[in-house]
């Protein structure tokens, strides 16, 4: 479920099991997100680097971020993110 207007950004990378697990979890939970494949282009890699980190997969919403597939952290993240305006 991609929603380019959503504040939740999901930085992914190709051929990555962790990325696949995060995407599957977000979709199963019906959480809207904007996905940026950091491995797809230099521009996308620069967008990831601009977050102050160069780790994917990562979900970010304002100052809140979760790296990797951690379902409990992602659920808590989403709860906090949904209140960021």
Image (cartoon, helix red, strand yellow):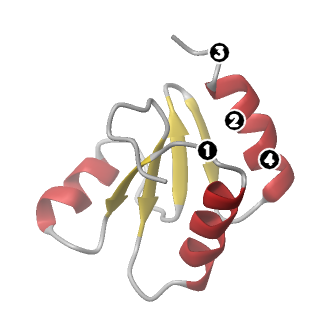
x then y, percent, for residue 40: 22, 73
- Which of pointers 2 and 3 lies earlier in the amino acid sequence? 2
Check residue 3 in the rendering and tell me which mark sits there, or answer none: none
First in sequence, mark 1 or 4: give its number. Answer: 1
40 horizontally vs 53: left or right: left
**Which x, y percent locates residue 70?**
77, 60
How far is the residue under mark 2 from the one under mark 1?
A: 8 Å
In-image side of 26 versus 7 (left or right):
right
Mark number, residue 31: 1
Q: Which mark is residue 78?
A: 2
Q: x and y percent of residue 71 in the render?
A: 80, 57
Mark 4 lies on a secondary structure that is: helix
Residue wearing tag 3? 83
Q: Which of the two labelled residues, at mark 2 and mark 4, occupies the earlier sequence position?
A: 4
Element at label 3: loop
Q: Quadrant of residue 36?
A: bottom left
Residue visible at 39% across and 42% down in the picture: 3
| Label 3 Cα neighbours within 10 Å, binned few <14 / some 14-19 / many ≥20 | few
* Cβ–Cβ under 8 Å for marks 2 and 4: no
């Amino acid at each position: 479920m991609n929603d380019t207007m959503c504040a939740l950004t999901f930085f992914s990378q190709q051929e990555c099991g962790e990325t696949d697990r995060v995407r599957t979890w977000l979709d199963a939970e019906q959480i809207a997100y904007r996905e940026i494949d950091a491995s797809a282009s230099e521009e996308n890699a620069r967008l990831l680097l601009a977050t102050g980190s160069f780790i994917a997969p990562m979900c970010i919403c304002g100052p809140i971020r979760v790296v990797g597939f951690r379902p409990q952290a992602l659920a808590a993240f989403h709860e906090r993110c949904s209140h960021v305006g």
